[in-house]
Image (cartoon, rainbow, N blue to C red):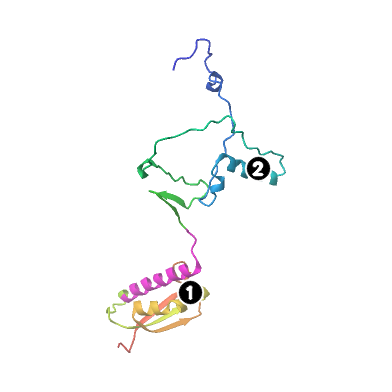
Amino acid sequence: MVLEKNVKPGTPVSEIFNIQSDKILEIGLTPNRCDAMSHYGVARDLKAFLDHKAIKSNLSLPSINSFSPVNIDKEINVNVEDIDIKLKKKKDIEELDIVENFSLLLDTELSESLLMERLSRELVSYIQKERKNQGLDVTDRIKLTISSEDEFVHETITNFSKYITNETLTLDLITKKESSVNKVYDRFLDIFIERSTNNS
């Protein structure tokens, strides 16, 4: 780019080309707000916001008297390949991501039922390791005792008792509300297993 000789070094480009500054409004529209998908629609929403803030404003529709009609005699064909729609991630939603042509919103909040299910799986894994440490055969049935003062632990065992007993070949499941020193999935509990005398 070659500038005029009278332009002093350090002169802002906006002054050289007489660029006018303006405000930019970034808006996010959902498919159900087709009424706002135009300049007038955005202006109408902006006026509603200004009215809410008690800021005086006027809404006027620009004149179209100077517009002349355009007659198109031939048929215009639009193919799907000619349409390019791009999704843009909203900056204020961290869990939202754009994967290929899909907008994905990941719900990272864990409900209590999901936390209990996770604990039940951790319990099964812990019990299976204890079975192996004690040298039990894979077909041996056991008597299982779980001690804990944590009400969450007891509620988990109640809700997932069938899963726990089936996965660990437990015939007798006993729970005790007693203090414990060991931890499973950040929950204090102690687990005791022994080979069941009724191994059928």
Residue plotted at (49% across, 77% down): 154
Placement of 186 over or under 45, stated as above or below = below
The amino acid pointed to by label 2 is Lys
Tell me, yes or no, whether the highlighted magenta stretch contains residue 130: yes
Magenta span: predominant SS is helix
Tell me, yes or no, whether the highlighted magenta stretch contains residue 76: no
Disc sitting over residue 50 in the figure? none
**Apparent side of residue 144 relative to residue 29 in the rendered image (left or right):** left
Residue plotted at (33% across, 72% down): 129
Residue plotted at (55% across, 23% down): 14
Tell me the magenta residue range. 107-131
Quarter of the figure that contains the C terminus = bottom left
Look at mark 2 in the image and give the residue it sits on: 47
Q: Name the spot of residue 183 as percent of width and height, x first.
A: 45, 69
Of callouts 2 and 1, which one flags the residue occurring earlier in the amino acid sequence?
2
| Mark 2–mark 1 distance (CA, rounded to whole Å) | 55 Å
Asked whether the residues under the numbered discs 2 and 1 touch, taking CB atoms below 8 Å apart as contact, a structural biologist would say no
Residue plotted at (50% across, 66% down): 111
Q: Quadrant of residue 20?
A: top right
State the count of labels: 2
Look at mark 1 in the image and give the residue it sits on: 153
Secondary element type, mark 2: helix
**Apparent side of residue 22 relative to residue 146 in the rendered image (left or right):** right
Q: Name the spot of residue 67 as percent of width and height, x first.
A: 55, 31
